[in-house]
Image: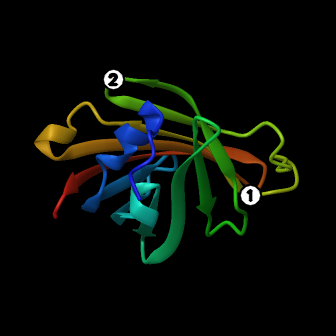
Amino acid sequence: MALADHHSAFDQMKQMAGSWEGTLTHSTGEVVETRSNFRLISDGNTMVENLIEDGVETLTTYSEQDGALKVTHYCSLGTEPEFKAASNTAGSVDLLLVADSGLHAKHHNFVASMNYDLSNIAAGSVVVSNTAMNGGTLESGRAVIRRVK
């Protein structure tokens, strides 16, 4: 079976295949270790990320649906937010929560957005930023990760 012709946001994300380590700085000032392993499966049509932040493991899937990048994050906050690419330019992929997610800031804890700054991926460095609703408060984080494999 041949690889599907993927949306450019998915193609950019496929560059993440491999293992990454770094630190995540939360908006609270807390700094934790982070490790990710990105792996292509399903003949290159889906990528899975196993992420460990401060010892807590989560899973995220990346695929293409109807010509657009679709991301599902199985979150340690107890939710499963879905994202679509809001924009992707050379070296950057912005992911926003889908409009009909059913998640509400007053009632749920969830990751609300993610951004992958891939501008230095050739040098083995990526910056991943996110926002999350936690207890009704918007929090943010910024991880600087480096390729280890």
Question: Which residue shows up at 85% across the image and 47% down it?
Answer: 104
Q: Quadrant of the N terminus?
A: bottom left
Of residues 141 and 50, the one drawn nearer to the viewer in this rendering: 50
Amino acid type at mark 2:
Ala
Q: Which of the two discs, 1 and 2, labels the residue nearer the N terminus?
A: 2
Helix, strand or loop status at disc 1:
loop
Query: In the rendering, at what x and y percent does residue 54 appear?
Result: 42, 71
Relative depth, front residue between 53 and 48: 48
Q: Measuring 61% from the left and 70% from the top, which residue is drawn there? A: 76
Which residue is most to the left?
Answer: 123
The x, y position of residue 60, in whole percent, is: 53, 61
Up-down relation of residue 82 to residue 20 (above or below): above
Callout 1, which amino acid? Asn
Residue 139, position as x, y percentages in the image: 60, 45
According to the picture, the residue beneath numbered tag 1 turns out to be 109
Q: In the figure, residue 97 lies in which quadrant?
A: top right
